[in-house]
Image (cartoon, helix red, strand yellow):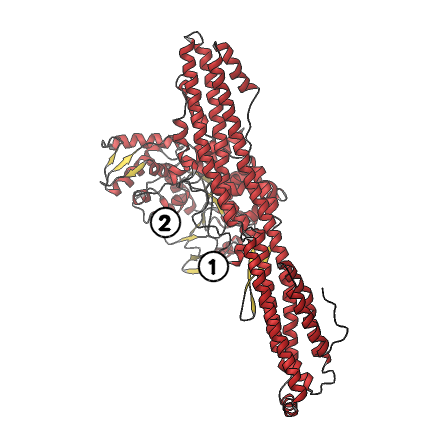
Amino acid sequence: MLEEPKTATINSFETYCESYKEAISKLENRQALKLSISKDYDTLISEYVTLGDEINEDHLASVDVYMIHYELSQQFKDLTILHRDVYLELVKGDVYEADLQISSRKLETHFLSSKTLVLNALETFISAMQQAQSRNSKDKNFQKKILKIQSLQKDPWDIYKVQLQTIQEQLVMLESRKKELLEASSIFNKLKDVVKDVNKKHDVFQEKIFESINFLAIKAKESTTFKEFLVHVEDRLNNQKFSLENNHQTFSEAINNHIADLKKIEVPIKTQEGLIMMREIDFNKRTNKWFDYQILPGFMDLEGLETNLLSLYNVNLLNLKNTIQLTKSNDTNNHFDNVVTSLSHLQENVEDVKLQAKSIAKKLHEEVNNELIVSNAFKNKPFIEVPLNSSLSIEGNTILKTLMEKWNSSLSFFNSKYEKSKSYESLSNLEISTQCMAHRMHKDDSQHYDSLFLNKNFIGDLFLVSRQLQEEKLETIVNQWQKGFNKSVLVIGNRLSGRSTFLNYSSKKRFGKHTVILKPNSTATIDGRKFTVTYDLKEALQYVKNNNIESTKPALIIDDIELWRDKEHSLLSNIRSLINFIETESDDVFVMISTSIMMKDHLDQRLNFSNAFSHVLDLNQADKNEISQAILLRHGAAHRELVDEKLEPITPQKVMLLAAKMSKIKHYNFGDTLQSWTYNTFVQDDEKVVFKESYLEFVDFFTKSELIILKQALIFKNITEYGLKRVVSNAFDQDYKSAIRRLVNVKILLRDPDGTLFINPVVVNNISRIINKEHSN
């Protein structure tokens, strides 16, 4: 560093400029140039500002004042901007170097160019200063002229001073941003190491399995009796058990711990017309989201491969043991040939898994190495962007799509002899359930036909099938209410059971236009008067009460009472208002409310909710004949021939049998059965509809944390991370945040545009039964 001048004079400033230029010319590396700009040139700026302040303390016009305030200030500001721009590029070079995105040779070339640029600019400024001093001291006419200029023009010094001090602050800011960016680069490298470690662990796991199989293959060739070989098999099964190397929770914790250290940074990307262009990037938020959608699905594929490989290995060894025990009295050589063949097939399967794992590992490696680059922030393109079609595509080319056929074809010779049902053990519950969801969510040319079976796409009542038993009960209740009895009805049932359809159809049939339908954030009408409905149910009910003409006696319909909640209005407070309304007004207003069985049970524990209603109608199960009639009615509307897999026509009688069978499987849930029909029908090019029964099932693969989240989503229909965090408090980050990501990535939870989460309709009742089973246990 150069020694600062003791006094602020034009001569001392010129001397310091010369010394600074000489020091720059001797610099040998870019870090020295950066240091010199941040220290020595910063001092040069301070000296110029001090000189500008002190040279005119008496505010009198002079040649020196003109030179410093008027003539040289713009040139010195330009020189200062150039130094700042050079410094910015040197900072960017440091970040590129930390990201390994630039060679040493290019950095050296950049340093030499920067050094030359600074020296030329200094030479120009010093020359201009010397010429100004010479001219001002010798030319008397010019001296008179500049004194006149000062008397007529406002002194621009205050503006230049602020600008120079701002650039000084920018140099400090650039150094601070560099440190933040280098820290982010270091964290990105740690994240890359975590992903790299996952691949290493998976390789180790595969090698252990492969070495064990090779060991048994060698022993099969060396052994002379089954008894001798069986000892090795049992030793591998009992004493040398393998465990999964990778764990979802451990991986998520490692990732989250590093991402937590990232923060929002205003990145200086370039200069334009003297200004620094900044780009604000929330590294924490973007990286977190990117890992959720781009890396976690790949990790889950690897974890799934480990699970399946371990199952395949254990099942084959177990079948090998059992088959040997059953057939050890047979010809030894013949059966040892089968043993060797079986182990050889198992080796081939492991090799297949290796290739699949290598493909996933390569993709993960490329993703993190191409995207987790801090210096990409300097470029004019999205930073660690999440594509719209990202996340686990269960219809796409993920590893899960081909697992079933791989594992089904990989069963050894012995599997066909001993417990064939064990073949499915080579698939984890996650893969089985994912295949089921992929089948149900698959979209093809059948979409128009499918829409006939999905209630949400209907307009009008032509396709509705009456729920005879419930209709008769409701008719009796309404008749009693019309005779002056206080009546109210609670309609319950699981999701897709037809609660909403029943409410809309029955209220329209019996009350027509004298129906008040309350929904949060909507507009309702009573006696021709419209009013706005918020989440405050008490307010809406009060409006109904105040504006109800007794001669009209309307029906009040509230579907999905569980949706009446927000930050200002709790569900319980709204329910209390509803109960109070029923108790005081149900002789003049016929109240019909719907909710799920889970929500009814939930509220009964707190408010004795269902007892507030005079009647409870259970729509959870429908009559199989009504379901069959609905299927025939909807299929008839398609005007297409229904055929089986052999393209033989299916008669209406057989449709009734298929519908009855499907109804039983779906626990006689009306909507679930109709939805299930679409999973098993496919429209052909010749306009025929092929019925192909699917045997894919959805099984429990959930952790305890995930089950708690899903139960909340079932009870309240939709949830948010904020709402869940209020319920579980401090445990959210540790146990539930990762669980939500997993459920979203495997499409168990879907997200509305407003950010709320809800259970995928294609599995909502499967999950309901899983949770009920867990609760009963």
Q: Earlier in the sequence, mark 1 or mark 2?
A: 2
State the separation of the CA atoms marked 1 and 2: 21 Å
Instruction: Report if residue 613 is visible in the image.
Output: no
Residue 211 appears anywhere in the view: yes
Percent across and percent down for residue 497 are 41, 39
Kindly give the residue lying farthest to the top in the view shown: 329
Dot 1: element: strand
Toward the viewer: 152 or 610? 152
Residue 116 badge: none
Question: Residue 662: x percent and y percent?
Answer: 35, 32
Residue type marked 1: Thr
- Residue furthest right as drawn: 6
Question: Could you say whether the residue bearing mark 2 is in a helix, strand or loop?
Answer: helix
Q: Is residue 433 shown left or right of residue 283?
A: left
- As drawn, the label of residue 532 is 1
Name the foreground residue: 719 vs 143: 143
Query: How would you rate the neighbour count of disc 2 (Cα within 10 Å): few for under 14, some for 14-19, many for 20 or more?
Result: some
Quadrant assignment for the C terminus: top right
Side (left or right) of 322 relative to 135: left
**Which picture quadrant has residue 336?**
top left
Q: Position of residue 340 (x, y in %)?
A: 43, 18
